[in-house]
Amino acid sequence: MNYTPLWLSLKIAGIATIIVLIMGIFLARILSRNQFPGKRIIESFLLLPLVLPPTVVGFGLLFLFGKNGPIGSLLLKWFDFQVVFTWVGAVIAAIVVSFPLMYQSAAASFGQYDKNIENAAYTMGSSKWKVFWTVSLPLAWPGLLAGLILTFARALGEFGATLMIAGYIPNQTETIPLAIYFAVESGNTNEAIFWVIGISMIGFAALIWLNWWSGRNILRFTNNQ
Amino acid sequence: MTGACAVLKVSFEKSLKNYTLHIDLSVGEEIITLVGPSGSGKTTILNCIAGVSHPDEGIIQLNDKVLYETSKKPLAIQKRNIGYLFQDYALFPHMTVEKNIQYGLKDYKLVEKLIDIVGIKPLMDSYPHQISGGEKQRVALVRALATKPDALLLDEPFSALDEKTRVECQDELLRIHEEWKIPIILVTHHMEEAKKMGNRKIQLNKGKII
């Protein structure tokens, strides 16, 4: 049995999740604290991949990162690097489709606690950076972690956009969802079943852990125990 | 603090939902009590002085430090060195009482004494959700004093305390004020408290001093 799809999937979803976590926290923090014209339009644009078919996202990414695309041509010219048909393309696809989940969780997490808790920290002379690390982040953490798990699960399961930008190249861009599709197509049912069970177990375990963890942590600061 | 007399000058306007807040007052080394019905702008005044929100125009100055001036960038909250006890305490829910107090600690000796006097020593390892409203209020008071502020804003600081503790905390605040000689603004609903604590009482109604 070739386990490459598992390692590839974990690598792609892992890298995408880390990037999405940082981007999601950063943008949610900026957008939730500032009011400006066009904010809703920007927010809607960030959430768009949630409602678009993955093939549309894939088409858009192909257009941007293709050899002649605005970003793709620059990458080729400057770094002699091509995104299409590489695992990096799969990472970009995973980032775009899973970003809205992280963004929504982060925006909700930073908006749910009393702002005076941060203000109190500021009145004690703390810098923005200190307040972020010692107050904002710990208070938002339960929601951020929920977003993190959903992001990872979504990135792990990404199929349509990945297929369009990264294609199906065994051992290079063959993630679990792609392996399942092409195993079924080539009549290799046993391999398909193996990966179906595998990815279902990973997703199920992640959700069970998330439910258990968030239940415990939501109670942590509210229960008089 | 400089050797000169401490003074907090507050003169500003701010549009609120139903009225415009006009405030013009100067607080020396004294305790001023702000009284008035709910929604009369008391907390907004404290917020503007602390830097949590900003006036539309005017000037706020503490000693020789300009905190706010029309059409200039307001001084950041963290650079004002103003102690603020928020009405809802705003304790850090994920930190123990001890960590809450240590967060901006500058004067360890004073705090040790205060903890004893206001009777929160047994609570040091508890989290805010594990203690009562009155206990939270005392923790928030000690936390605000721990930073050795140049001015102190107290939004109903003793409202959740029982009679005995309230008197003890009031007396302790008067004693600290005697020692520090900083401007203190205290918001209260109790006329008796306003009389006892304040060198001056300021009555507010719909954003105006009456």
Image (spheres, rainbow, N blue to C red):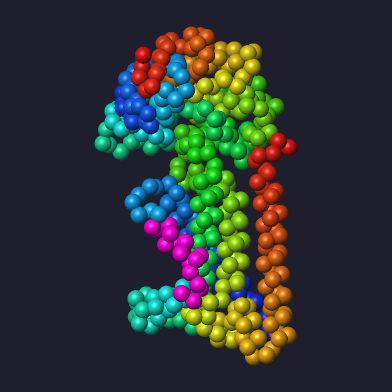
Residue range of the region highlighted in magenta in the rendering: A41-56
Q: Nearer the viewer, residue A33 or B94?
A: A33
B184 to A192, vertically: above or below: above
Tell me what residue is drawn at x 46 percent, y 74 percent: A56
What type of secondary structure mainly makes up the magenta span?
helix
Q: Nearer the viewer, residue A107 or B80?
A: A107
Report the number of numbered marks: 0
Residue B167 found in image quarter: top right
Tell me what residue is drawn at x 52 percent, y 53 percent: A106
Tell me what residue is drawn at x 48 percent, y 8 percent: B195
Residue B30 found in image quarter: top left
B39 to A182, vertically: above or below: above
Percent of width and height locating residue A16 = 53, 68
Quadrant assignment for the N terminus of chain B: top left
Tell me what residue is drawn at x 38 percent, y 22 percent: B206
B37 to B196, vertically: above or below: below
B190 to A174, vertically: above or below: above
Quadrant assignment for the C terminus of chain B: top left
Percent of width and height locating residue B67 = 34, 31
Percent of width and height locating residue B178 = 48, 13
Magenta segment: does it hold A50? yes
Residue A170 found in image quarter: bottom right
Seen as rendered, the residue at the extreme bottom is A186
Seen as rendered, the residue at the extreme left is B71
Percent of width and height locating residue B98 = 62, 33
